[in-house]
Image: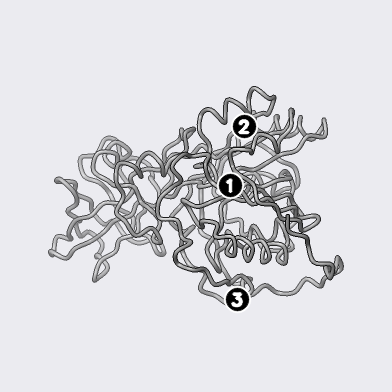
Amino acid sequence: MTQPPHCDNPRRIIRPMFLDDFDFDLPADLIAQTPATDRTASRLLHLDGKTGLLADRQFSRLPTYVARGDVMVFNDTRVIKARLTGVKDSGGKIEVLVERVLAGDRVLAQVRASKSPRADSRLLLAQGVVATVLGRQGEFFELRFEACADIYALLEQHGSVPLPPYITHAADTADEARYQTVYARAPGAVAAPTAGLHFDAAMLGTLTEQGVTLAHVTLHVGAGTFQPVRLSDLREHQMHSEWYDVPQATVDAIHEARARGSRVMAVGTTSLRALESAAAAGTLKAGTGDTRLFITPGYIFKPVDRLLTNFHLPKSTLLMLVSAFAGMDNVRRAYQHAIAQKYRFFSYGDAMLIERQ
């Protein structure tokens, strides 16, 4: 067990946050390219944000760190096969990454091509799938799929799993199974809520048997989660938008846990962002909507006591969120420890269990 430093000052001055405050050097060989053999076989680094203590654990032991009456909140979004390839009607090669399914036969998508497609141009995609460019919305293009009654079915048949850019192999059938949580329900995400990838059905059953409440939210993770922050002063950064749904049953479970003194754990940063978005007015309430919530150190958390998460990219908004939850100094030391101990990083990597600072 690693001891915290003794020079921690509880009265630190809150200053503007800059991008370089969240940088670190990561050896490339620590970026996990494939998942652990078994979902629960990952390592687990336990960080107590109150004391700064670090402890090396195994994820398979997670049920021993929660108690009867605790609530664990999972993001039940389902990753869609959002990546399509083809050519423009002019002949140039393109790649389409669907960001969000809209009403009817329309989507918002990133389109990668040597030249951006014009409005009203046609994209000739896999096996005769045709999409018309309707226009542009910021960094995304609005596309309409021709003769399409069900976009999700079209993507399932013709698309591929949109693995993150730091995973170097093309998605295969193994990724179709493992880049998806076992409890995924609501299609719409283009990136997995990766903290949930560590759970299998047996562990979920064990948690239920020992009296832990398993609650759910939905937040459709967008490709923007991998987009770099380009502005040095974080006050100028505009967060990407993601759709969320926090049901009344989850709100009730959390309020009941609070009333009896039990703890609330968000499984993943996406579950935490959904809950914090639903509590933006001060009290957690059920509801749906789009969130651009950008959490940086100094943020006051409301419903969540504990966070289960993977290790995140340097200079990423997710690392900023984790630093807000556990404290910047604590997270720096935790990441230095994880690198020294050769933990596996990012989507297919190991996990952290964090107690809120």
Q: Amino acid at mark 3?
A: Asp
Regarding mark 3 in the picture, which secondary structure is present there? helix
* Residue type of the residue flagged with mark 1: Gly
Q: Is residue 22 left or right of residue 160?
A: right
Badge 2 or badge 1: first in the primary sequence = 2
Estimate the spatial distance between the alpha carbons at disc 1 and disc 3, rounded to whole Å.
Answer: 24 Å
Q: Quadrant of residue 292?
A: bottom right
Furthest residue toward top: 209
How busy is the neighbourhood of tag 3: few (under 14 within 10 Å), some, or many (20 plus)?
Answer: few
Q: Which residue is mark 2?
A: 215
Q: What is the C-alpha distance between the residues marked 2 and 3? A: 36 Å
Name the residue nearer the viewer: 284 or 216.
216
Disc 2 from disc 1: Cα separation: 13 Å
Which secondary structure lies at badge 1? loop
User: Where residue 255 appears, x then y in whole percent?
Assistant: 75, 33
x, y percentage for residue 85? 23, 55
Of 257 and 285, which appears nearest the observer?
Answer: 257
- Vertical arrangement, residue 237 with respect to residue 357, above or below: below
Q: Which mark is residue 20?
A: 3
State the SS at label 2.
Answer: strand
Q: Which residue is mark 1?
A: 268
Which residue is located at x 64 percent, y 47 percent? 57
The label number, if any, that marks residue 309 in the structure image:
none
Density class for disc 2 (Cα within 10 Å; few <14, some 14-19, many ≥20) is many
Viewer-proximal residue, 130 or 249?
A: 249
Asked whether the residues under the numbered discs 2 and 1 touch, taking CB atoms below 8 Å apart as contact, a structural biologist would say: no
Q: Quadrant of the N terminus?
A: bottom right
Q: Residue at x 75, y 74 (%)?
A: 15
Mark 1, residues whose alpha carbon is within 10 Å: few (<14), some, or many (≥20)?
many
Q: Considering the image in quadrants, where does the C terminus appear?
A: bottom right
Q: Tag 2: residue type?
A: Ala
